[in-house]
Amino acid sequence: MLSNPQAEKRKLINLFYKKDFEKALELYTSLLSYFIDDPDFRKLGGDIYFNLGMTQAAVGEYRQALNLYQKENKLNQALAVAEKIKNLDKEDSEIFQTLGELYLQQNKKQKSAQNFGEYLRRLFKNGESGKANRVLRKIRENGLEEYLSSQFGFVLSKQELNRILEDISKEKIYVAFFALLKKELARAERYKREFSIILSECDRILNQDERMRLKGVCQKTLRESDIYSLGSRWFFIILPETNKYGAEGAVNRLKKQLKATNIGVQFYVASYPTDGTEVKELIVTALRYRIPY
């Protein structure tokens, strides 16, 4: 039991500034039990480990300091430590979410969006569409899209979105799909039910044989209650009483069956009411926030 831990802590700080890192580490480990919940002390430990070239140990201490700073609502200190972690641990994807949240709390929207964008890019790469959906919803709710559309392909600019909408509107089936969607929306509103849509973009204009193969996949994969419309390059699906998780499951089943057809398809999903309460809003949300299912 030390008689004066604070005096030893001051001694530790002096050792650090004198760059006597080996002695500083020895003293740090002996003092840790006294200052285990002190974020400044844990950050100092991280700095000591870093200067000794012990990167993994440094990151561990910085993580502890970050958690403690966040608990104490010390945003500036938390941000500084989170940036250190980001620079030292290139495999840590979650730190980008943390930075996005911290910058958002400081109303630094551009920096927040950049970090959320990198987090999303990594989620997409790992196929974690569920997490990506939740992050995109936060981005939309906080008005961060404008900072992402020019840098990341998963949030479209208005010009890009209008180009795709124009492409879809050329499909002969689009008018009928729009009418069916409007009918399903009215039913969902009346009975307070969920439903989802899947907008599916093929990698080429399909010939008749390919369209028949695609029809067979839909018949085999979808439920009898599901509604699908096949166009020349796009096909549309309405999934009554299905939330986004159910829609993701349907997409995964479709992708599995499509492997044998040699038809490349990109899927865009939206759900009522979480992604919109009007027909066009659902279509726009599915397309603009292009989660690569």
Image (cartoon, grey):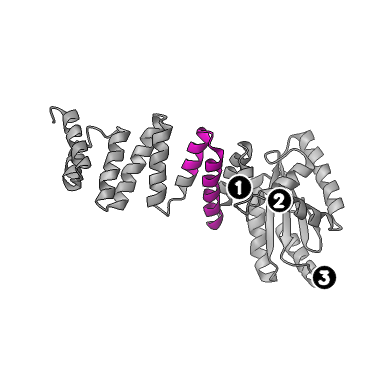
Q: Main secondary structure of the magenta part?
A: helix
Quadrant assignment, res 172 = bottom right
Mark 3 or mark 2: whose residue is earlier in sequence: 3
Mark 3 or mark 1: whose residue is earlier in sequence: 1
- The image shows residue 50 at horizontal and vertical percentages of 29, 49
- Closer to us: mark 3 or mark 1? 1
Q: CA distance from mark 3 to mark 1?
A: 39 Å
Element on which disc 1 rests: loop
Q: Nearer the viewer, residue 212 or 222?
A: 212
Would residue 291 be counted in the magenta stretch?
A: no
Quadrant assignment, res 170 = bottom right
Q: Amino acid at mark 1?
A: Leu
Reading the image, the residue beneath label 3 is: 208
Reading the image, the residue beneath label 2 is: 287
Q: Nearer the viewer, residue 48 or 229?
A: 48
Q: Is residue 94 above or below residue 293?
A: above
Element on which disc 3 rests: helix
Residue at image position (75%, 55%) is: 164
- The image shows residue 220 at horizontal and vertical percentages of 72, 62
